[in-house]
Image (spheres, rainbow, N blue to C red):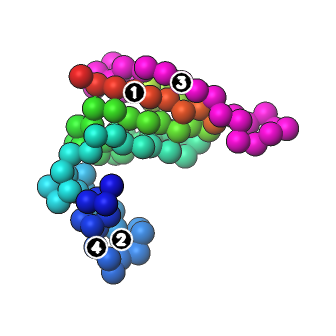
Amino acid sequence: MAAVAAALPRDCSPVARAISAIELVERAGRPDVLVLDPPRAGLSQKIVRRVLECEAKRIVYVSCNPTTLAGDVKALRAEYGYELKRVTPVDMFPHTPHVEAVALLTRS
């Protein structure tokens, strides 16, 4: 992770720090794990392409919407060979109906 942080420009705002996944991989090397925490709508196709450019063997997907989690996992499995290993519900907001889901996907 330190290598990734070191590869990012220091004088940019968080928005300006968005660089291509290929450039990041060239600077810092391929990640072992990607952690994704998309908005309620799920992953955009652009983000899915960037994820695939990184060629990570594992993805930890944190979701606040089980419906979009299911759709994204289905796409990552069918199109890109990721396999869902485990999903764990996490109640971060007690006394509400909201439950986060943390999923582990792997690719050989």
Q: Is residue 78 magenta?
A: yes
What residue do we see at 70% from left, 42% from top? 92
Q: Label 1, on which residue?
A: 105
Residues shaded magenta: 74-99
Q: Label 4, on which residue?
A: 9
Q: In the image shown, does 2 or 65 lie closer to the viewer? A: 2
Please name the amino acid that badge 4 sits on. Pro
Disc 3 to disc 1, how far (Cα)?
9 Å
In the rendered image, the quadrant that contains the C terminus is top left
In the rendered structure, the answer to whether residue 27 lies left or right of residue 77 reads: left
> Of marks 1 and 4, which one's residue comes earlier in the chain?
4
Circle 1 Cα neighbour tier, 10 Å, few/some/many (<14 / 14–19 / ≥20): many
Q: In the image shown, does 19 or 94 lie closer to the viewer? A: 94
Q: Above or below — where is 5 with respect to 52?
A: below
In the rendered structure, the answer to whether residue 64 lies left or right of residue 86 reads: right
Quick one: SS at disc 3? Answer: strand
Q: Above or below — where is 55 with respect to 5?
A: above
Please name the amino acid that badge 3 sits on. Val
What residue do we see at 44% from left, 28% from top? 104
Residue 74: mark: none
> Of marks 3 and 1, which one's residue comes earlier in the chain?
3
